[in-house]
Each structure stands twice: as C-alpha cells, then as structure tokens.
Image (cartoon, helix red, strand yellow):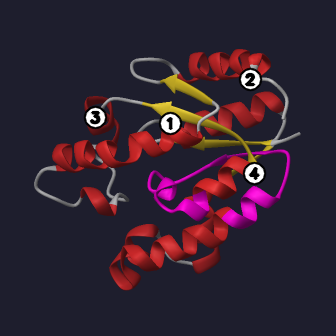
Amino acid sequence: MQNLIIVGPMGAGKSTIGRLLAKELRLAFKDSDKEIEQRTGANIPWIFDVEGEQGFRDREQCVLAELCLEQGQVVATGGGAILRPENRQAMRTGGRVIYLHTSVEQQIARTARDRNRPLLRTANPGQVLRDLLEIRDPLYREIADIIIETDERPPRMVVQEILARLDDLPHR
C-alpha cells in the first residue's frame, strides 16, 4: 500500500488524525518531527535555538526523503515541510497527500498552551499564523490529493471522511 502523507499547518491535527488513520488501516504511523527528535536526542525548540530554522529544515528534508521512500505507512509532517521543493516532490512521489486545512482561529485555540512551537514564541502568534498560512496554503493545495476541513470536527469524523475520499481516488 502507498503511504498516506498528512500535511497542514500546526494545530490542524496531523499527528492525532494520522495516528487514528494508521490504526484504522493497520499501518505504521510516523511523525517527521518525532523522528527528528529521536535521531538527534533533542527537541525541536532546542534544534531551532542551536541550529536555526535552516538547520532544522535540513534535518527535516533528510528525514522526509527517507520516510517517503518507505511504503505502507501514515506520515504526519511538520507544518513547514511544504516549503522546500525537494520535500514537495518527495511527498508527491511518496504516496497520497492529505491536506488538513484549519482556520487560524482554530490553530490559536489548539496551540495556545504548546511550548514546543518555536515559530509562535512571539507577541502576536495570530499574525504569525496568518502570515504562515498565506505562504503555505497554496503549497499544501498544490500537492494535495485530498483536502479536508478539520475545524470544529472530532478527529474520528475527519478520519472517516479521509477513508471515504481515499476510496474515490483513481489509482496511480
């Protein structure tokens, strides 16, 4: 079976929905950020502090390339993984891409207490999220096989919609 690769902004539910989807399909679940943390022995904020965003993105690109070469798993990506053309290509060729779209308001609600978000360490996280979405949304849409709205929806309902929409996709 092809990989299912989940993209979207922070707070969209990529990890939560990815785990549920993997369980439902009896597939392995991989979270690219968790893979980076396990390989480095450091958390994402520490990597950002020490290596900067560029260093983190370099690590992310290596991990994504490896994960996309494997088969039969659900992969949750970091929100910014979409920024590099090499990552977009790896995801497109590595499986079916599912874009979990959510509003900035929902992102704020879901990430308000999360200290593991280096890009939100600012006086105005809402503006940061709006700016990020403006840049990233077209890139998510460019590679998505399926786009799912997650606002105000329980994760299990989102998973059921993904499963139904996967059945409708032509084989490639």
Q: Which mark is residue 141?
A: 1
Q: Secondary structure at mark 2?
A: helix
Q: Which mark is residue 104?
A: 3
Which residue is label 4 attached to?
94
Q: Marks 4 and 3, Cα distance to the nearest angstrom?
A: 28 Å
Q: Quadrant of the C terminus?
A: top right
Q: Residue furthest right?
A: 1
Left or right, 154 with respect to 170, comes to: left
Figure check: 27 above or below 90: above
Which residue is label 2 attached to?
166
Q: Quadrant of residue 118?
A: bottom left
Q: How many discs mark residues in the rendered view?
A: 4
Q: Kindly identify the residue that appears in the image at 24 percent across and 48 percent down.
A: 131
Specify which label sits upstream in the sequence, 2 or 4: 4
Determine crowd level at label 2: few under 14, some 14-19, many 20+ residues with C-alpha closer than 10 A: some
Left or right, 142 with respect to 73, comes to: left
| In the image, residue 66 lies in the stretch drawn in magenta | yes
Q: Amino acid at mark 4?
A: Gly
Q: Which residues are magenta?
A: 65-87
Residue 10 visible? The answer is no
Residue 111 visible? The answer is yes
Specify which label sits upstream in the sequence, 1 or 3: 3
Determine crowd level at label 3: few under 14, some 14-19, many 20+ residues with C-alpha closer than 10 A: many
